[in-house]
Image (cartoon, grey):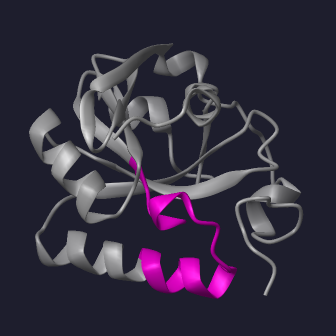
Amino acid sequence: MQIDAKLWQLYCDVYFSSHSVNTNILGLTDGVKGAIISVWNPFGQTLTLQQNALFSRKVLTYLNSKAIPYFLLWGGSKDMTYRELSVFVRVDSTRACQLAQQFKQLAYYYVDNGILILINSHNRQQRTVVGGLHRRVLKVSGLHKWRNALTAGNLAIAKS
């Protein structure tokens, strides 16, 4: 299954931000391989905040039950008006694809020595090297409204 070009380009134009003030994305991913996988909006369908909370809880419960270490981060547009809760998991590329499929995601990002690669979950031949992860991590300081207000202006959440 190919992801259409317009959606693929949106996925290529991704940025990431820490989920909490104490999380240093680049420090936690430096020199390791792993995947960034959304835990919201399965199959690309925009869900309500309550539906996304339930879905992400199931995913995190699974990761905990399998003792797969992870940390949370936001993935979205550069201005974060569209942002989805995501996880970074230290896994090899095969397991990354399996998890992305299990978590019902169309695509995922694989990080290999600081390089970000977008990969179709159901057709690994469709892939794009997005570039250095360091160029895609937003440097934020202090408390930002979009970080604390999940629903305010977040286009990744359907209206209830």
Against 32, is 61 above or below? below
Comparing 64 with 30, the one in front is 64
Against 13, is 98 above or below? below
Residue 112 point in image, percent of width and height: 27, 21
Q: Is residue 127 left or right of residue 90?
A: right
Residue 124 point in image, percent of width and height: 24, 31
Comparing 54 with 16, the one in front is 54
Query: Does 53 appear in magenta?
Result: yes
Against 39, is 126 above or below? above
Residue in view at x 29 percent, y 53 percent: 100
- Total numbered badges shown on the rendered structure: 0
Residue 43 visible in the shown view: yes
Against 28, is 95 above or below? below
Residue in view at x 68 percent, y 31 percent: 138
Residue 139: name its quadrant.
top right
Residue 115 visible in the shown view: no
Q: Is residue 50 left or right of residue 153?
A: left
Find the magenta span and give its range.
37-56
Residue 35: name its quadrant.
top left
Q: Quadrant of the C terminus?
A: bottom right
Comparing 95 with 1, the one in front is 1
Residue in view at x 33 percent, y 41 percent: 1
Query: Does 67 appear in magenta?
Result: no
Residue in view at x 28 percent, y 16 percent: 113
Residue 6 point in image, percent of width and height: 64, 30
Residue 5 point in image, percent of width and height: 57, 26
Q: Is residue 94 left or right of residue 15?
A: left
